[in-house]
Amino acid sequence: MQISMMLSYAGGFRESAERVAELEKVGLDLVWVAEVYGFDGPSLMGYLAAKTDRVQIASGILPVYTRTPTLIAMTAAGLDALSEGRFQLGLGASGPQVVEGWHGVRYSAPIGRTREVIDICRKVWAREEPLVHEGRVFTLPLPAGQGSGLGKPLKMIGRPVRARIPIWVASLGEKNVEMTAEVAEGWLPFLFVPEKAAQIWGTALEAGRAKRDPALGPLQISAGGVLAIGDGPEVRQAAELLRPMLALYIGGMGAKGRNFYNAVACRYGYEREAAEIQDLYLSGKKEEAAALVPGELLDAMSLCGPESFIAERIAAFKEAGVTHLQVAPIPTGDQTAVSLIAKLRELID
């Protein structure tokens, strides 16, 4: 099992990059770099590539609506070259609030678009022939009826470091998860409770794996939660830090009926709580919404407790198929993020 974590921008990006350089020395295997509506992800990942030597650098995620498929492929190839083969491409559909509100792009056919982006990226990197793609979402080159008619098939200038860059997909809905298990190297779930994951996504994963190309290898899964190790009450309280984030996703990430995260909470059996959290969050009562996040859900999505408890949680995530334990280290006492990752590496090994 590998260790991954989302890049924290606390204290500034340069400082965060320096921390990653220290963390890779004690066992951090992969760092995810988010892109929502702040700084762009590729610039930050290029900086990370220059500051680190071993850690894998992954987009977590690049939205499939905000760049053309070929630009996504070019960006991934460039980052893979800068990092000497350490880049992994995380893709996702994001949501209509960001895609339409921030980027002004129509949010439609997310599953089909993601599938075609993956197909085009792999054609670009393979460089087997000039790029031609005929799909429901993208047609390359652009037909004469939709453009000047002067476009022609092209092949990427220069050969990528790798002809196959690993692709991860962030997905939650059954059809999207099925597609992920079929065509991607890795899956990025959210609100992942290892003991309940199979009842939520098991059927979709099984259906996707049945159509999976064996050349892709086993599906990789990155999931986990807040990490705090120790016996004191402050350690158990670390899980409480998830409350505002979970309230944001369950309550505020999308309108009613279009919030994918709220739907997952409902499928876990928290229909009443999810509805109340959404009502409160959308009416501006964020603290009240956070207070309603079930404590049971917080505990299930975190690794906070003594070493024996952490070992049990590691085993639960392994049993659920997680290959990359994704953590957010919360030091207590004289601990540091570096010492926590070092201890986690020891417990996993």
Image (cartoon, rainbow, N blue to C red):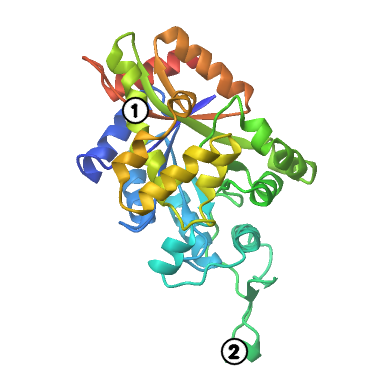
The image quadrant that residue 329 belongs to is top left
**Residue drawn at (57%, 29%) of the image:** 323
**Identity of the residue furthest to the right in this view:** 210
Q: Position of residue 166 (x, y in %)?
A: 58, 45
Q: Is residue 110 above or below residue 245?
A: below
**Residue drawn at (32%, 31%) of the image:** 241
Q: Is residue 17 above or below residue 345?
A: below
Select label 2 or label 1 by which is in front. Answer: 1
The image quadrant that residue 186 belongs to is top right
**From this viewpoint, is residue 85 visible?**
no
**From this viewpoint, is residue 192 visible?**
yes
Q: Position of residue 41 (x, y in %)?
A: 37, 54
Q: Position of residue 308 (x, y in %)?
A: 46, 7
The foreground one among 90 and 195 is 195
Q: Quick check: 152 left or right of 260? A: right
Q: Mark 2: few, some, or many residues within 10 Å (few <14, many ≥20)?
A: few
Q: Looking at the figure, which quarter contains the N terminus?
A: top right
Which residue is label 1 attached to?
240
Say which mark, if any, is on residue 150. Answer: 2
Q: Is residue 50 above or below residue 75?
A: above
**Residue drawn at (59%, 89%) of the image:** 150
Q: Position of residue 79 (x, y in %)?
A: 43, 52
Looking at the picture, which amino acid does disc 2 mark? Leu
> CA–CA distance between discs 2 and 1?
58 Å
The foreground one among 123 and 344 is 344
SS label for mark 1? helix
Q: Is residue 183 above or below residue 217?
A: below
SS label for mark 2? loop
Say which mark, if any, is on residue 207. Answer: none
The foreground one among 95 and 1 is 95
